[in-house]
Image: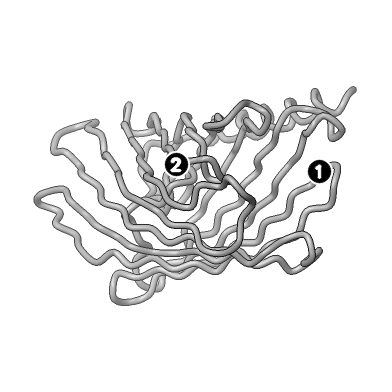
Amino acid sequence: MNFVNLHRITVLVLLGISLLSISNSVAAQSTIFNAPSTDVQSPRKVYLETDFITHFASYKNGGYQTYEPRLVVGVPGHVEVGFNVVYTRAASASPIEVQPNLKWQFYNNEKAGVALAVGGVLAIPVTHRRDGNTTGLVYVVGSKSFSGAHTPRLTFGGYQLLGRFAAGTDKTGVLAGVEQPLNKTFSFVTDWFSGNNDFGYVTPGVGISLSPKNNIYAGYSIGNQGRGNNSLGVYYGHTF
């Protein structure tokens, strides 16, 4: 069995296990796929997520797999703090990164369906430090929800990259997202970052509510600049 087929089977098995576990409920998300949402975790709530992202190709042709556990904790004041660890397996060694992050939901009008949030994340290489730089991203986002059954939530915002990047990297841009419930279990989800940078993708996919505390998302990221880094991602989250 070749490398590409092995990883396709792995992803299909993960999705199959999830579909066998479905129940009808909704779990909140701190991100859509890659773009931040306006949601924050409730105080003393802990959200743990494991992400698997792969580009289906051999290593010599640019294939890779990224493994990213994420931890988010809600604190008083409509604030959440988080910590991610990112490891990418590819032909050339990539730095393992730690990513502390913070988000503050500074406005929430449930009656109007409007929320606003601001946040940021640092990316700090802890291995192969000569091959990576400490960088950051700061953002502001707003969302609009609509009354009624199975109505969408729309998200829009802007972002700024901080730190040293390769020539030609766009450091500012906009982001957007749509979350459209199809029923109590399934949602159509997509988000987009503008620009030519590590975030510059559109990611359509599906969200599945497994239980009040569990969810799984699967999406395919399509680069704004070419298809060389297009990837499939599977994200499983649990709230404690």
Q: Position of residue 171 (x, y in %)?
A: 48, 52
Label 1 and label 2: CA atoms lie apart by 24 Å
Residue placed farthest to the bottom in the image? 76
Q: Which label sits on residue 118?
A: none
Instruction: Report which residue position mark 1 lands on.
Output: 90
Color encoding of the figure: one colour
Residue drawn where x is 67% and y is 56% of the image: 86
| In the displayed structure image, the side of residue 183 where residue 204 appears, left or right | right
Residue placed farthest to the front in the image? 167
Q: How many marks?
A: 2
Q: Position of residue 112 (x, y in %)?
A: 10, 49
Q: Position of residue 214 (x, y in %)?
A: 48, 48
Residue drawn where x is 40% and y is 49% of the image: 212
| In the displayed structure image, the side of residue 62 where residue 42 appears, left or right | left
Q: Earlier in the sequence, mark 1 or mark 2?
A: 1
Q: Secondary structure at mark 1?
A: loop
Q: Are marks 1 and 2 in contact (CB under 8 Å)?
A: no
Q: Position of residue 2 (x, y in %)?
A: 88, 24
Quadrant in which the N terminus appears: top right
Q: Secondary structure at mark 2?
A: strand
Q: Amino acid at mark 2?
A: Phe
Residue placed farthest to the right in the image? 1
Circle 1 residues within 10 Å: few <14, some 14–19, many ≥20: some
Instruction: Report which residue position mark 2 lands on.
Output: 193
216 or 108, nearer to the observer: 108
For marks 1 and 2, give the one nearer the viewer. 2
Circle 2 residues within 10 Å: few <14, some 14–19, many ≥20: many
